[in-house]
Image (cartoon, helix red, strand yellow):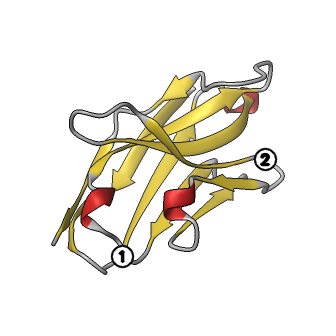
């Protein structure tokens, strides 16, 4: 499967952004989809995931501010980010787990940059 992100950009602290990801190719093999982020000098970390059935999981740092959603018919996953903080600045990667995998992510997008200005 191939994952292509869209959205992102720059926003003032307290503002909102929405980033989306479209999956193509072997999409029948996808189970979990999600978003990870990597800030400069830091390791990539989980932001949020969502299963095909709609079960979600969020990092503590984004709970109550970010919402992940998924359109199984369109094979897209979206991350609505509200009340953004400068520390949310990072490259955000879309990721997906194959149906045969138990953990981790098998597919990754190229990433989209989100910059939050103080």
Q: Nearer the viewer, mark 1 or mark 2?
A: 1
Q: CA distance from mark 1 to mark 2?
A: 25 Å
Find numbered disc 2 in the image and state the secondary structure of the residue it sits on. Answer: loop
Vertical position of residue 49 compared to residue 70: above or below: above
* Rendered location of residue 86, percent (x, y): 24, 64
Q: Which mark is residue 92?
A: none
- Residue at the farthest right position: 53
Which comes before the other along the chain, label 1 or label 2?
1
Q: Residue at x 36, y 76 (%)?
A: 16
Find numbered disc 1 in the image and state the secondary structure of the residue it sits on. Answer: loop
**For this rendering, which residue is in front, 95 or 83?**
83
Crowding at mark 1 (Cα within 10 Å: few <14, some 14-19, many 20+): some
Q: Is residue 18 left or right of residue 118?
A: right
Can I make out residue 73 in this image?
Answer: no
Can I make out residue 81 in this image?
Answer: yes
Q: Residue at x 40, y 46 (%)?
A: 5
The quarter of the rendered structure image containing the C terminus is: bottom left
**For this rendering, which residue is in front, 110 or 91?**
91
Q: Which residue is mark 2?
A: 52
* Rendered location of residue 36, percent (x, y): 47, 42
* Rendered location of residue 92, percent (x, y): 37, 45
Q: Residue at x 22, y 33 (%)?
A: 41
Q: Which residue is mark 1?
A: 16
Q: Is residue 81 left or right of residue 25?
A: left
Vertical position of residue 16 compared to residue 57: above or below: below
Crowding at mark 2 (Cα within 10 Å: few <14, some 14-19, many 20+): few
**For this rendering, which residue is in front, 93 or 4?**
93
The quarter of the rendered structure image containing the N terminus is: top right
């Amino acid at each position: 499967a191939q994952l292509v992100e869209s959205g992102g950009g720059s926003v003032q602290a307290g503002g909102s952004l929405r980033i989306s990801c479209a999956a193509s190719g072997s999409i029948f093999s996808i189970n979990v989809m999600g978003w990870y982020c990597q800030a400069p000098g830091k390791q990539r970390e989980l932001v949020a995931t969502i299963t095909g059935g709609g079960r979600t999981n969020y990092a503590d740092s984004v709970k109550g501010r970010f919402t992940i959603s998924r359109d199984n018919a369109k094979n897209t996953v979206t991350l609505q980010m509200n009340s953004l903080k400068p520390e949310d600045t990072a490259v955000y990667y879309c990721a997906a787990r194959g149906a045969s995998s138990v953990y981790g992510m098998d597919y990754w997008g190229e990433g989209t940059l989100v910059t939050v200005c103080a």
